[in-house]
Amino acid sequence: MTQFERLILGMIARDEAAEATAEQICRRGQSFTDDVLCSMVTVDRAGHLHPFAGPGLPPTYSAALDGIPIGPHVGSCGSAAFLRQPVAVTDIFADHRWGPYRRLAEPLGMKACWSSPILAGNGRPLGAFGFYYRDHRGPNRGEEELVAECVGLSAILLDRWERSAEVERLAVVDGLTGFGNRTGFERALHQVSLGRGAAALLLADVDGLRRINDAFGHATGDRLIREVARRLRRAVPHARLFRITAGTFALLIEGADVGVGLSRIAARIAGAMRPPAWCGPHLLAPAVTCGAATFDGQAERDPERLRQDADLALRQAKETARGGFVCFRPERAAAAIRRRQGMQAAARALAEDRLEAHYQPIVRLGTRQVIGVEALCRLRTPDGRLLPSGHLAEALRSPSNASLVTDRMLARVARDVRAWLDQGIHLQHVGVNLSQADFRQGDLVARITAALAQYDVPRHLVVLEVTETVELDDGGRTVGTAIERLRNAGLRVALDDFGTGYASLAHLLDIQVDIVKTDKSLMRRFAVGDTGEVLLTALLQMADGLGFQLLAEGVETAAQAIRLEQLGCPLAQGFLFGPPRTAAVTAALLPRAAPAGSH
Ligand code: C2E
Ligand code: CA
Ligand code: CA
């Protein structure tokens, strides 16, 4: 082994910077003659050249070569790497292979260039080693020997460098999409914050991913993620793309057009998602909700702030513009913080048992008699205010909160119903809302019947309200079985918010329920011949055959009530008949059974 070989192999073994080792190799090539400059370029797996070392070459020259695809007529190095054999061009100015690159070499006084490929064990080009001459000449014998030595060492160096670069790359790449992963995102975000130019962070969250995973399995969910990734790449080709959680993509967009441009980008993303996509055997409608923030208005470019702002915008979008886009604005942040505080207040109220059941009357349309109520949950703040149900909806997203709400409501409702019955109140129907989480726990029937038994409330009075979306989430199976068990236990079940979900009518054929409650949005489309009336008529025709009763929710006007009655809808609920009120007020609205002995 020569002294030089020992030096280079030592540097490689000590993992010294590969670029520095490559420079050493080039210097060795230049050490014998004055009229020679050496350079090393690498070739990536896509076949593009990248400058790696060139101690005598100006950076502008190297930079000009970056990214050029190799080919049979691409200068000396591009040709040598492509042909996998040495290429000696003795006159740069006459040789067609140098056509486009001549103007780069000319100011440097280069006249000839001899390049040797650097090949991996399997023959793939790793790079090329170039010899530039100030004369029209090719290599002499001594140079050939020297270059053979340099090329051999370069192959070892580049092979090892490529492998460690690959390991490093994999550490920041998301295996599913090929985008950067969370670590890659953090690094890139930090880098962007060090720069000066305009930059934006756009977060794109895949809508309904959990539901799709639950209903169709993770393989389908993964397919959807890959499809969304492909569409994002096409919609925003100049962004740097990352997947930072299962269903959240982060797009770093640098450039001047960030301000108004962002809404345009978001619109392009929404457009790209529009066509339905086959994910295995399932035809899905991909959709993303986007939130973005920019460094505008930040005194210092704080990457953590940018991310929090974008997060906040995304959360707002999810609440108010699902499938759409919200850009962070400082003045909006205050409202979001208030909302978050509301949600925390709801969680605290639950923990501290400040939950109340309010009751909304349900009437029989033919007689306008109040035949029952729906129990609706309200949260009382320590200073005595009632929290609107919007906060409850947030809190209900957590499964533990959701089943807590059900248990507390069941206890309150059982107690109130017992009190009413004891006062001689005549009541046929008490609706209680269930959540998705209630179906995940196997003991639902036992929980309900135990709560009722404690106050000796007859089971047939209780109508458990299940929303259509709850049903779809589980592909219908577990919920269907649970509904059957509830009914077998003597409880009744209502399908709530009917007409807002997807396969509404199909559900009715699969799962037997006692009551179908049409969603209040239907009342808004309830003119003669409008969709609301068409659906209602169809449902009324099905009701007898399928053994359910129809209850129209959200009845606000006398005209709606009259039309419902004409169509033959038996039950209704809505502000026309009264809003949800406390148990005490409700007691006064409910009919009393005739006292014993009266006529
Ligand atoms: P929901 O089960 O569909 O309840 C009916 C909602 O419609 C109630 O809102 C009620 O106040 C409102 N409403 C009643 N009549 C009318 C009307 O004529 N017009 C309009 N526009 N709205 C009317 P609320 O009490 O704010 O409850 C909202 C949602 O929160 C409920 O929708 C239900 O999904 C959920 N929720 C309420 N209480 C509970 C509960 O105890 N447990 C569970 N799991 N969810 C609950
Ligand atoms: Ca309900
Ligand atoms: Ca409803």
Image (spheres, rainbow, N blue to C red):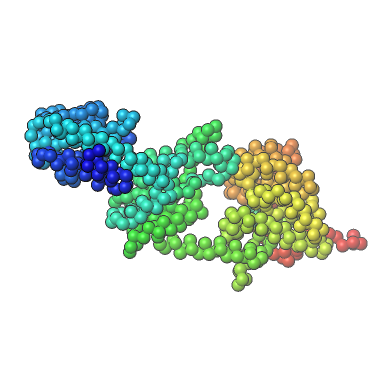
Please tell me which residue is depicted at 39% across the width and 55% down the height of the picture.
293
Please tell me which residue is depicted at 16% across the width and 36% down the height of the picture.
131
Total numbered labels = 0
Res. 63 in view: no
Question: Which residue of the protein is positioned furthest toward the right in this rendering?
Answer: 597
Q: Give the percent coordinates (x, y) of residue 412.
A: 72, 62
Res. 473 in view: yes
Q: Give the percent coordinates (x, y) of residue 25.
A: 21, 41
Quadrant of the rendering where the N terminus is positioned: top left
Q: Nearer the viewer, residue 382 or 363?
A: 382
Q: Within the image, what quadrant is residue 487 found in?
A: top right
On screen, 471 above or below 86? below
Going by the image, does 387 lie left or right of 276?
Answer: right
Please tell me which residue is depicted at 69% across the width and 42% down the height of the picture.
480
Please tell me which residue is depicted at 87% across the width and 62% down the height of the picture.
595
Q: Nearer the viewer, residue 399 or 189?
A: 189
Question: Which residue of the protein is positioned furthest toward the front in this rendering?
Answer: 1
Q: Nearer the viewer, residue 37 or 554?
A: 37
On screen, 449 above or below 159? below
Q: Give the percent coordinates (x, y) of residue 280.
A: 52, 33
